[in-house]
Amino acid sequence: MRLIRKALNYSQKDFADSLGLTQGGYSDIERGKNGISKPVKLMLINVHKVNLSFLENNRGEMFYIETPPDQPEAVSSTSDPNDSSDTKDRVIELLKADIKRLNAERALYIELLHSKDKIITALERQLKN
């Protein structure tokens, strides 16, 4: 969890808020004191697009580009004007978290591209020699 949080550039408090947890509750998960509940896993998938194989087994990419089709959406937004403001506030909060995650992912991809460009440049230099 710590790797994911740091990759997204979140503080413990902000990451906990995005998952509907208290900072202390999240800290207990990060330290291994508590496990990750199914609702928290759904939030990780739907809000932060976390690959559970990476989380649970350290396999595959850290994030999905899209929510896996076999996973239910944790939050559905409706355009019903009678929705409570709490629901709308929560949707806004989730969208802001999604924007933050996407910006962090973009930064990671740009860093990866630069790294691969450097490798290509080094290999091309070796071929010329």
Image (tube, helix red, strand yellow):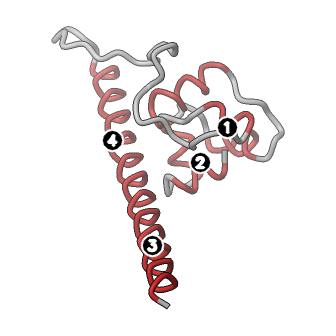
Circle on res. 4: 2
Q: Of label 1 and label 3, which has the lower sequence position?
A: 1
Horizontal side of residue 20 vs 101, given as left or right: right
Q: Nearer the viewer, mark 4 or mark 3?
A: 3
Q: Nearer the viewer, mark 1 or mark 4?
A: 1
Image quadrant holding the N terminus, namely top right
| Disc 4 to disc 2, C-alpha distance | 17 Å
The reply to whether the C-beta atoms of the residues labelled 4 and 3 are less than 8 Å apart is no
The spot of residue 26 in percent (x, y) is: 66, 40
Toward the viewer: 120 or 106?
A: 120
Q: Which residue bears the numbered disc 3?
A: 120
Inspect the image, locate mark 4, and give the three-letter code of the amino acid beneath it: Lys
| Disc 4 to disc 3, C-alpha distance | 36 Å
Q: Is residue 3 above or below residue 76?
A: below
Q: Of label 1 and label 4, which has the lower sequence position?
A: 1
The spot of residue 81 in percent (x, y) is: 16, 12
Inspect the image, locate mark 1, and give the three-letter code of the amino acid beneath it: Leu
Inspect the image, locate mark 2, and give the three-letter code of the amino acid beneath it: Ile
- Badge 3: few (under 14), some or many (20 or more) residues near its Cα, within 10 Å? few
Q: Nearer the viewer, mark 1 or mark 3?
A: 3
Inspect the image, locate mark 3, and give the three-letter code of the amino acid beneath it: Ile
Q: Which residue bears the numbered disc 4?
A: 96
Q: Is residue 80 above or below residue 17?
A: above
The spot of residue 97 in percent (x, y) is: 39, 41
- Badge 1: few (under 14), some or many (20 or more) residues near its Cα, within 10 Å? some
Residue at image point 37% right, 33% down = 94
Q: Which residue bears the numbered disc 1?
A: 55
| Disc 2 to disc 1, C-alpha distance | 8 Å
